[in-house]
Amino acid sequence: MSDFNIPLSTDDHVVIGNRLRECRDALMHVMTSAVPGTRTYQEADRSLAALDRLRAELEHDLRGTTRAMGFDSFWRTARRVSGSRPQISFSMA
């Protein structure tokens, strides 16, 4: 079950995940630039931990969304038939 009133699409998860990854990179830059033990460093550290928890929750939600859509059983079946994860390509034509 999703934590959202209107469940996020897989595209939403991709966009949000990319932005959170960029935010994480910015926080890591702050942490490497700040003096350890200062308030700035501590706030960045706490923010980074909260960001990682949020990303984990979104990952959990995404797995629930894809299972509900039947993708999970598709991958298990494809792996059982071929012995590996199938390669999918998309065309914009």
Image (spheres, rainbow, N blue to C red):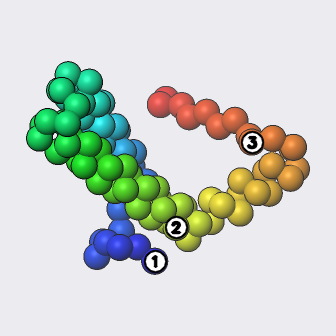
Specify whether 18 is left or right of 75.
left
Q: Residue furthest left?
A: 39
Q: Residue furthest top?
A: 33
Q: Secondary structure at mark 2?
A: helix
Q: Secondary structure at mark 1?
A: loop
Could you tell me residue 57's position as x and y percent? 41, 61
Precedes in sequence: disc 3 or disc 1: 1
- Amino acid type indicated by mark 1: Met
- C-beta proximity under 8 Å, tags 2 and 3: no
Residue 23 falls in image quadrant: top left
- Which residue does the numbered mark 1 point to in the structure image? 1
Q: Nearer the viewer, residue 16 or 89?
A: 16
- Amino acid type indicated by mark 3: Arg
Q: Local crowd at mark 1 within 10 Å, few (<14), some, or many (≥20)?
A: few
Precedes in sequence: disc 2 or disc 3: 2
Residue 86 falls in image quadrant: top right
Could you tell me residue 21's position as x and y percent? 34, 37
Could you tell me residue 49's position as x and y percent? 32, 49
Residue at the (69%, 35%) spot, across then down: 87
